[in-house]
Image: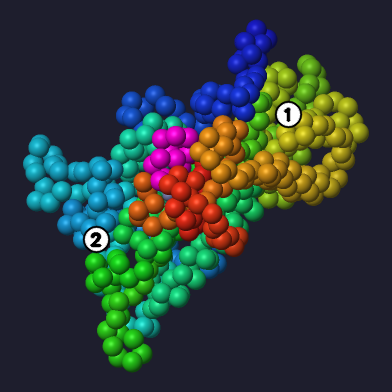
Amino acid sequence: MTNGEAAQNEKEVIFHISKKDNFPDWFGEICRVAELADIRYGVKGFTPFLPWSVMTMELMFDILEGVLQRKGHLPMLFPTVIPESNLSRESHHVQGFTPQVFWISEFGDGEKLDERLALRPTSETAIYPMYSLWIRSWRDLPLKRYQRCTVFRSEVKSTRPFLRGREFLWIESHNVFATHEEAKAQVKEDLETTKEVVTDAFGVPTMVFRRTQWDKFPGGINTYAADTLMPDGKVLQLPSTHDLGDNFARAFDIKYINESNETVYAFQTCYGPAISRIYGALISVHGDDNGLRLPFKLAPYQVVIVPIFKGKSADDVIGYCQKVEKALRHAGLRVYLDSRDATPGWKYNYWEMKGVPVRVEVGQREVKQEKVVIFRRDLMKREIVALTGLAGKVQTVGRDYDSVLRAEAESRFENLVVDAATLGALEGVLDKGKIGRVQFCTTEADGLICAEEIKNKTGGEVRGTRIDVEESATGACIVCGKAAKAVVYVARSY
Ligand SMILES: [Zn+2]
């Protein structure tokens, strides 16, 4: 590359968009410039994901699956297609999902299938008929399984890479228990897993709600979901977990012989962390006006080494960089030595925009002094350190970097919830990008009328009731004025 070309590229990688003021542009541009996804595929809602996002999502899967397996869930893999007759066995479930289902009705040269096949929108109706064959006695329980796959939903809302697509990457965990108490304990465990993985490991803060009856998983008893806050003040649902009671067991005939030799229905739960969506939240929450800031745990490259040389010093500097690379790799770090033909300045901008946590800069002076310069993407600061003990130093910096990212993300949750007594006041709260806490008549199905009034007047959605804090309703419903029976949270959402 000539100097002219390098200079031209240099312009291209200087990313600067205000994330707070112009989030949709920020998100679209970072997907394009950082090469995360390519929206030119040509089928609405279907998007190729590129190496820089896929490598991080693979790491996210590894962390989540590690936690699931430690808690006794084992992997399996079901077919993508579900016969129509399976899908219609649970009536609420079929009503809830049918509008979103993609169907296969023919093959080859227009030959019709005997029965239509659905591309799985979620796999209860694929998996549970098999569970009914596999489960015989109390000794087969609990059965805790999960699969890592993509699912297909014909989303009607506008689609966006990672955040809302018609095919997305997730893990779905499907569990069967002898009693409802054990199933409820699993729901609690799932919420702890969400905290352990999404909040603690990925640094994305969440608030957990029990969804209202009109907003729960179709066919289930209760849905619990974690919402995070996006930079534009809207909330995004991250993993949800569902107490299915024995509703699906009755529909799919999942029975077992208990210790008293009686045949009884089992109880079930399912949990669905969508990795591609969590990735969308991750980059949005941690990114800044200069581009991505990937957590050290999840960055495809944790460290990039940039050699700085003129003419004859090249061999010395490159040789020293290779030594640095070897030492860091030996310590288990993900390292890339950027020896491409471009200026150091261009490389700095490029890797800052790509969100690499730590950069190591090496010039003639560092070679002579057996040192390196390290640069942190979170603080945008340089430090000179010795080559001896460099790997340990980078590990320490990495841990500190992750806690800085997490603390910054959590600070946006402070003072986020504001009480509102009237619809006008609630609208004001939502306009500020905050979450409104209101007195509400009921979270049962008939509360939907008041929820729709809130939606029409303020654009906010009722996200449900908090489960981590004890709250009792007082006074009157913010909409209809009837005696309040619940304290609910209202936010604008994706
Ligand atoms: Zn009401």
Q: Amino acid at mark 2?
A: Glu
Q: Which residues are magenta?
A: 450-463
Residue 310 seen by the camera: yes
Compare residues 182 and 455 and report the one nearer the observer: 455
Residue in view at x 64 percent, y 13 percent: 11
Mark 1 vs mark 2, CA separation in Å? 58 Å
Where 250 sits versus 264, above or below?
Answer: above
Residue at point 82%, 26% (across, down): 363
Residue situated furthest bottom in the rendering: 260
Residue 405 in the image: state x and y as whole percent.
70, 42
Q: Is residue 368 above or below residue 131?
A: above
Residue 213 picture location, percent across and down: 38, 56
Q: Which residue is mark 1?
A: 306
Q: Give the mark count.
A: 2
Q: Is residue 283 visible?
A: no
Q: Secondary structure at mark 1?
A: strand
Q: Nearer the viewer, residue 213 or 363?
A: 213
Name the residue located 46 percent from the left edge and 70 percent from the top edge.
184
- The colour scheme applied to this rendered structure is rainbow
Q: Quadrant of residue 106?
A: top left
Quadrant housing residue 14: top right
Q: Which residue is mark 2?
A: 90
Residue 318 numbered mark, or none: none
User: What residue lies at 45% left-to-right and 75% top-to-bottom?
Assistant: 181
